[in-house]
Structure formats: structure tokens, C-alpha cells
Amino acid sequence: MLPSFCKDIVTRLRPKTTESRGKTVPDWSVAPDYEEIDGCSMQPASTSLSTDGRVLGISDLYTLYAPSDADIMAGDRIEYNGLIYEIDGDVRVQPTACRLDHITINLRRYNG
């Protein structure tokens, strides 16, 4: 359980799946399943500007701290304040000895 100041609400988006060439793959072309998760904390991590001269783009990174029982996994997306972030990496379980167990998730949004 995270501290009481963690009051952000995020929406977990999970894609439906489809068969492609004998494999089950995510299908974002149809409306995903969603679940609102409260008791979270969204914290800005970093932002960067592409400077290679070909395409102007901004990468925006956040860290999401969510309750340990939140149904979030790699491959999902997170919506927060009207913006959609992709999960960058795996969902990490953070056990503690003082009842502050939670999960930590790196998020990325690219605009460009």
C-alpha cells in the first residue's frame, strides 16, 4: 500500500488479441479493455528532444508507482491526464518491510 498522498488515478489499457501467422499478437485496432486504478503516483522522470536533424520529436518519460495488487503488465498502456503512455520494460514489484509494497513502472510517450 502506498502512502495516502498517492492520489493519482490512471487507466490501464490492455489490447485485445488476434491470431497472425499462427501466433497470438496484441490488436490495438479495436477498443482495448480498460480498468481505472487509484492510489497511484505519476512522477516525471525525464524528457528529451530529438536533435538528429531529420525529425523533431520529444520523448517524455514518467515513473508510475501503483498499489501492489494493480492489474498491470508489460504490453499494457497507461492513460493519464488524457495522454497515453507505453510501458517501457517490465513491471517491477517493490516489496518493503513496512507495508508500503507497490509496483514501479517506467512509462514513455513519444511525440514527433
Image (tube, grey):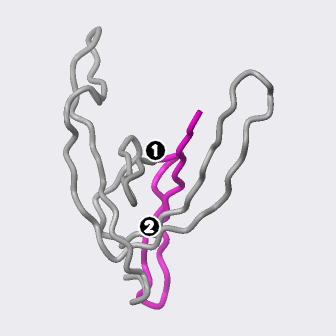
Q: Residue at 59% x, 64% y: name it.
A: 44
Marked residue nearer the N-terminal end (1 or 2): 1
Region in magenta? 87-112
Query: Does the magenta portion include 27?
Result: no
72 shown above or below 44: above
- Of residue 97 and residue 103, the one placed in the foreground of this image is 103
70 shown above or below 19: below
What is the CA distance from the residue labelled 1 to the residue labelled 2?
A: 16 Å
Residue position for label 2: 103
- Of residue 42 and residue 82, the one placed in the foreground of this image is 82
Q: Residue at 39% x, 89% y: name it.
A: 4
83 shown above or below 102: above
Q: Residue at 36% x, 73% y: name it.
A: 67
Badge 2 amino acid: Ile
Return the x and y of residue 21 as percentages of the image width and height: 29, 8
Asked if the residue under mark 2 is in contact with the one under mark 1, i.e. CB atoms within 8 Å, the reply is no
What label does residue 86 carry, if any?
1
Return the x and y of residue 65 as percentages of the image width and height: 46, 69
**Would residue 58 appear left or right of 103 to someone viewing this image?**
right
- The secondary structure type at the circle numbered 1 is strand
Badge 1 amino acid: Glu
- The secondary structure type at the circle numbered 2 is strand
Q: Residue furthest right?
A: 52
